[in-house]
Amino acid sequence: MTRGEQYGRAARHALFYAACATAWIIGSSWITRHVSDAAGFELIKGLGFVAATSCLLFLVLVSHDRRARQAADRTRRLIESSGDAAFLYRSRPHPHLEYVSDIVSDWLGLDPEDLRQRADAVAWLVHPADRHLLPLLLTLETRHGVAIRWVTADGRVVHTLLDVLSVTDRRGRATALEGRLRNVTDERRDKVESALAEAILEDVPQHFEATELVQRTCERLVALAEVEMAWFGVPLDDGTVQVVAADGDVEYLDNLQVRWDEGPLSLGPAGTAIREHRAVAMTPDQPGYEAWRARAFNARLTASLAIPLRHGSAVIGVLIVSSRFGNPFDDAHVARFTRTADRLAIVLAATGRPMDPSIGGRSPLAPEHTWFDLPAALEGGRIEVWWQPQVASVDGRIVAVEALVRGRTEAGEVVLPSVILPEAERAGLMVRLGRHLRRLAVEQAPHWLALGVERVALNASISELHEPGFALELAELVDRNSLARDQVEVELVESAPLDMRAARAVAELSISGFRIAVDDYGSGWASLGHLAQLPATTLKIDRVFVRDLGTSARADQLVRSTFELARTLGLTAVAEGVETVSQAHALAAMGCELHQGFLFARPMPTPEFERLLRHHRDHPPAEWAAPLLPEL
């Protein structure tokens, strides 16, 4: 409506009022002149005037209210036509939502009527970190562009932008908020993803080490994305995930044993992501995953997302982000985090920057994780024996040591068995590799025996046992290095049952005087039936059951019964994968004779193992093992 039209409309109303008033005056004057009871008529005339003006005022107010509602409806329709929501929130006489657009049901998962019936609807849905903004909205005449997050009934996080007008009463008190609510969730998350991508690319020219790159990425995720914790880990060959960078509320990580293989925590987001090569989002209220759920509840986490970083066909790391308010990890947002992780993996692989070895991570790069030139490594002397001790539960002595394979790239980076052994099988080099490792181990063994070790354990696969003369060749090697044959233990490590050829080789080894160890008892091929057929002297409990001690009644019973079986058959019992003090205590109480695991020592190269043996020789075992083994 133009200003001229407004003036014309006002003039018509004024003329109508003047005409009514003139008619009233003329009519009342004529009646007064012809009526004898003037006083009574004056009273009637006054009451009639009051009634007429009241009716007129009522009509004016009704018309004004109708026009105001029409204007408000037009404004709301205009707001809603753009996909935004209009609302009116009254704080007086009692807090309530007087109006809210139907579109909020798509955003928040609640019917507008449900919101109107809850007096605390706004405070109930607002993100806890943004609730302090609510009182401020009523303190100023207008508020423009206020960013508010909402946590929906099903845990989703919605980002909105508010344009708010404060409505006041005649006393100037703020009684209501009226305005527009715009859903900017996708827009904000897209900007965050773009900022993270630019930041990762900007770091490349700065020549950061890989650890610094992932640390800065974690810091930016906490600062920019809607997460309270971010950390980066590297999957190790022993089934653990080594944390190399973290930011935010990460204090609970110190007590979190993250696993990716078959341990109880392998069912959490990190383990699942690494094993299945896909992004995994979990909430503690999902069924299953008991071990992870308990830790998530204790850390007050409401959702976690794990994204594997892939280089070729290998997972070189895992990025985990967690929230303590709702579940921001819908499908679209998971895709954004995945793209960020993919960019980080590309940058790490392209720059060739290794993880800081002092932190315990492995290189996230490199070709050795997808392919390793094993023949060149054998020719170049880059295949090594590393050592892991077996500790007696009675007195803490290092009784035995297992020889393990490690390789090195030309750049000197360590290559793990998970890369070496598959390549050896593919290239048909298992026999050559085993022969090389046994030679190195047996040549070094006399030195370990001189420092107090009683025996050395060597691994053997079925393909090696199939080689003609395997037992004779090992006997000659041991005799040539002046070792007693009962000081050498052959561990049968294989995922398939031994066939007749391999069983005959094992029998020859036993007759020749070698000790025989059955590895991974309780899983894979190693079962009671095979144990009855093999001339075993040592029984090694699979680490899967050791990890589950205290959390699985089945694991407790299996381990206990295995120790009883070992005592009955006169076998030495060894527990693999001992990583916590509680596990060591439980195993010792069950009668385990030897412990092997990270609690006591990780696999280490020859110089480090020699220093360890000399230190233990010069210091009574009780000084270092007493806190771990309750019998001491």
Image (cartoon, rainbow, N blue to C red):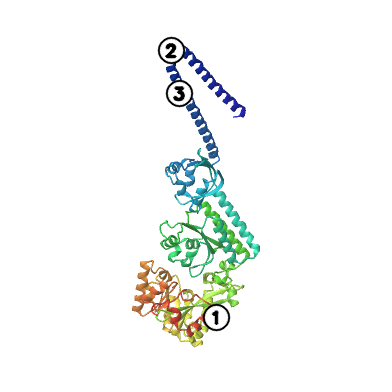
Image vertical order of residue 221 relative to residue 44, above or below: below
Q: What x and y, as percent, mark residue 139?
A: 53, 46
- Most foreground residue, 30 or 42: 42
CA distance for labels 2 and 1: 133 Å
Q: Which residue is under mark 2?
A: 36
Q: Earlier in the sequence, mark 1 or mark 3?
A: 3
Q: Position of residue 588 (x, y in %)?
A: 38, 76
In the image, what residue type sits under mark 3?
Answer: Ala
Residue identified by numbered label 3: 51
Instruction: State the image coordinates of residue 580 (x, y, percent, origin top left).
Output: 44, 72
Quarter of image, res 39: top left
* Distance Cα–Cα, label 1 vs label 3: 109 Å
- The residue under label 1 is 607
Q: Nearer the viewer, mark 2 or mark 3?
A: 2
Q: Are marks 2 and 1 in contact (CB under 8 Å)?
A: no
Disc 2, disc 3: CB below 8 Å? no
**x%, y% of residue 261?**
46, 66
Q: Can residue 178 be seen in this snapshot?
A: yes
Q: Identity of the amino acid at label 1? A: Pro
Callout 1: SS: helix
Query: Residue 345 falls in which quadrant of the image?
Result: bottom right
Q: Are circles 1 and 3 on residues that touch, CB within 8 Å?
A: no
Query: Could you tell which of marks 2 and 1 lies nearer the N-terminus?
Result: 2
Classed neighbour count for the residue bearing mark 1: other residues with Cα under 10 Å, few (<14), some (14–19), many (≥20): few
Query: Which quarter of the figure is the N terminus placed in?
Result: top right
Residue 553 drawn above or below residue 53? below
